[in-house]
Amino acid sequence: MKRIILLLVLFLALSSRLHILNADIIPLNVIEEDYYDYVELPPPGSVMTLAAHNHDISAVPIFAMQHPQTTITQILTPNETNSATYVIMASSFISEVSHFLFQNNRLVVDIFNAVIAVEEIESLFVDDLLIDGISVISYEPDITRVVFDLADHMGLEYSITLSADRMRLIVSFASNTITRIVTDIGQDWDSMTIQGTIMQEINICNEGFPYYLTVNLDNTAMVAGNGIFLGGNFGARYVTGQREDGTAYINIFLGQRLPDYSIVHGTSYAVLTLYQAIPPFEPIIVVIDPGHGGEDPGAMHFGMLEKHLVFDISMKLMQLLNNNPLVRVYSTRYGDYNLSRERRAEIANSIGADIFISIHVNAAHNRNAHGIETWYTIGELELEGTHNLNSRQLATTMQRNLIRFTGANDRGVRVRDSMVVNRDSKMPSALVELGFLSNRYDAELLRNVEYQRLLAEALYNGIIEVLMTYFL
Ligand SMILES: [Zn+2]
């Protein structure tokens, strides 16, 4: 029997290294057949009745040191801030403590080499959901025995801690128990399922350390042991433990910088998930290029100049795009000045535009020519483009929307090699010809502000369709 006890103590001493603050945690799952009265409890020190338990835990005997006899002066009952902790106060150093669980409903704490200041405290008044009563008796001339009557509470756990100055014995009870921790690994996430009873407040912090995450569980007994995230994406390993204030903790040591995390919990579990943060949404950058400007008026018919007309339509389009948070829009020109075609492409390239749209109106010797057409050029650089959008698709989408909105004569999508604006730009680009200024019918439409607004809306819808189809 003694050998078994010795082995047990050795095992406990070794496994105690996993625990911090030398805390004892014993689940109260002992099943005993007989009922004994207090006086029939086994004599102190002669029994090592460790609670039978289902969990992989360790109970650590508090380190014994010989000191002159001390006096137990009082027992502090729980205050409002820490409802499950009792503090047994001594007048000087406590030499030795042992404790055991009797039946399923009594925790017996023997304090050796200690007398009681008051001869016998019959029964302390206790107002606690977890404890029905406390008795303090002198067991032998120099042993003070404190017996906690435990309320019938499934999963009740306790821990006993001797303060660093050895003058306070802290007995904590918790109805929260973390019994098991299970890790799971997904393709781009790691999760930790914390199993236990009656989860209360769960608090997560990383204290500013990028490779570290702590899960704190108030008023909880930690029974689950340490573990690793086998093959994890973010988590590497975790260490469990107990603090003197009754808080249980799980320290997660991350294999990389802190990912995003979330925690959900019910009454008997909590799931912590680590996952890679989704990068914040980057708006699609659209560059609108109103043709001509300054000394280059573009087409001139019926008292209208192309440079002014396309600028007005472009600004209406910009206004629509500016109100859409999915888009960030720029113009190549914001006034009546000219830019070379190369310069316009350069601006779009330097901004990092995703889409480039040049706005023009047509003119022809044949005054009967009318309608809308869209041009594009297959540029060398554009072939490297992302998002699977090419200039032909962009042009097609713009043309389709322009015709749908205006009902204009559909002159189709056309490809051209010599269009410098499109050829030099590194992103899908299109050039829209919104009508023939040389045609009386088209010219009168283009002069109308409402028709200009309709064209702007058609272009806006084309851009949004492209965005929805190719970027999102
Ligand atoms: Zn033009």
Image: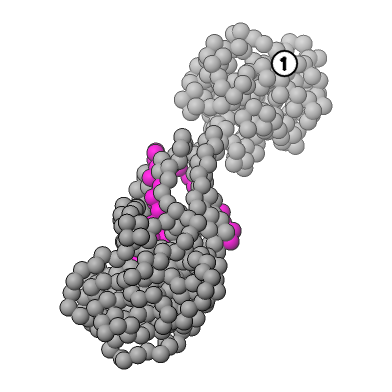
Residue beneath the point at 77% across and 16% down: 411
Asked if one can make out residue 293 in the rendered structure from this viewpoint, the answer is: yes
Which residue type carries mark 1?
A: Val
Left or right: 371 as drawn, with respect to 329: right
Foreground residue among 214 and 73? 73
Residue highlighted by disc 1:
413
Query: Cβ(mark 1) to ligand 1 < 8 Å?
Result: no
Say whether residue 113 is left or right of residue 155. left
Asked which quadrant contains residue 401, the reply is: top right
- Please identify the quadrant where the C terminus is shown: top right
Please, what is the dominant secondary structure of the magenta stretch? Answer: strand
Please tell me which residue lies in front, 47 or 74.
47
Residues drawn in magenta: 238-267
Residue 59 position, x and y percent, is 37, 61
For the point 71% across and 33% down, which residue is it?
461
* Residue 292 seen in render: no
Q: Residue at x 71, y 20 (%)?
A: 396
- Please determine whether, in this image, residue 264 is positioned above or below residue 458: below
Q: Position of residue 235 (x, y in %)?
A: 43, 41
Image position of 249 with respect to 428: above or below: below
Judged from the image, the secondary structure of the residue bearing numbered disc 1 is strand
Farthest residue, direction top: 417
Return the residue found at the far front.
1
